[in-house]
Amino acid sequence: FAENSGPCAEAAIRSIEQYGITTCSTRHELGNQQYMITLEKMVADYLGVEDCIAFGMGFATNALNIPAIVGKGDLILSDKLNHVSIILGSRLSGAHIRRFNHNDIQDLEYQLRDAIVHGQPRRFRPWKRILIIVEGIYSMEGSLSKLPEIVALKKKYKAYLYVDEAHSIGAIGSHGRGVVDYWNVDPKDIDIHMRTFTKSFGS
């Protein structure tokens, strides 16, 4: 892959000659490129989801998009072993954050029930949104999320679910689609999937 000759190098040269090295800015400033639209449609079709947005870096995807999803008056329930990019994005969002014990479904359900019963601290108003954030495979210890049980709780308590599959996409599942594929969960039951090309697809 890193050779300076061969099919990968030749494809890279052709791509650079046609499109340049980077768009140099956001879509808002410079518009869409057809190759990005094609890539996003191809990925969405492969994953069996409605649509897809491609970003330049996985860390920034979590850190900068979680604040676009939730904010003040929302609650994030985050697994204690979530990646630092998720922690940063959660903190930047302004949402209230509670952490549940790693892969502990009983603790997650307790936190969900408590959040619904008591509402926002000192105000006792209902949360605008409750977002559960988990990883597919946890990067620091390699454990798999208990996705079927988490999806069941998400439905039961009418929460939203964000799954970071940076380390599971391409690595597990009969079709290489990550924990969603591994556990045979309907992709539509997960509100936001985060995946990356930098791990298994890069190799």
Image: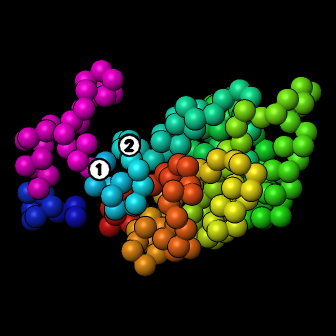
> What residue is pinned by disc 1?
41
Compare residues 167 and 190 and report the one nearer the observer.
Answer: 190
Which percent across, then down, holds residue 173?
46, 75
Q: Residue furthest bottom?
A: 174
Q: Quadrant of the C terminus?
A: bottom left
Place of residue 56 in the rendered image (x, y in percent of width and height, measured from the top left): 36, 42
Q: Residue at x 25, y 26 (%)?
A: 31
- Left/right placement of residue 126 relative to residue 26 reads right
Residue lying at 69% horizontally and 56% vertically, measured from the top left: 155
In front: label 2 or label 1: 1
Task: Give, as a three-letter code, the residue at label 1.
Answer: Lys
Residue 106 shows up from this direction: yes
Q: Earlier in the sequence, mark 2 or mark 1?
A: 1
**In which image quadrant can residue 67 be found?**
top right
Q: Tell me the quadrant of the picture where the N terminus can be found.
A: bottom left
What residue appears at the point 40 percent right and 72 percent down from the top-left corner?
A: 176
As rendered, which of 108 and 160 lies closer to the eye? 160
Dot 2 falls on a residue whose secondary structure is: loop
Answer few, some or many: residues within 10 Å of disc 1's Cα (few below 14, many 20 plus, some between 14 and 19): some
- Give the magenta range: 11-39
**What amino acid does circle 2 point to?**
Ile
Q: Residue at x 64, y 68 (%)?
A: 148
- Image coordinates of residue 152 in percent, x first then y, are 69, 63
- Would residue 68 be found to the left or right of residue 125 on screen? left
Q: Local crowd at mark 2 within 10 Å, few (<14), some, or many (≥20)?
A: few
**Residue 14 in magenta stretch:** yes
Is disc 2 in contact with disc 1, using a CB cutoff of under 8 Å?
Answer: no
Q: Is residue 169 above or below residue 53?
A: below
Q: Is residue 19 magenta?
A: yes
Magenta residues: mostly which secondary structure?
helix
Which disc is residue 53 wearing?
2
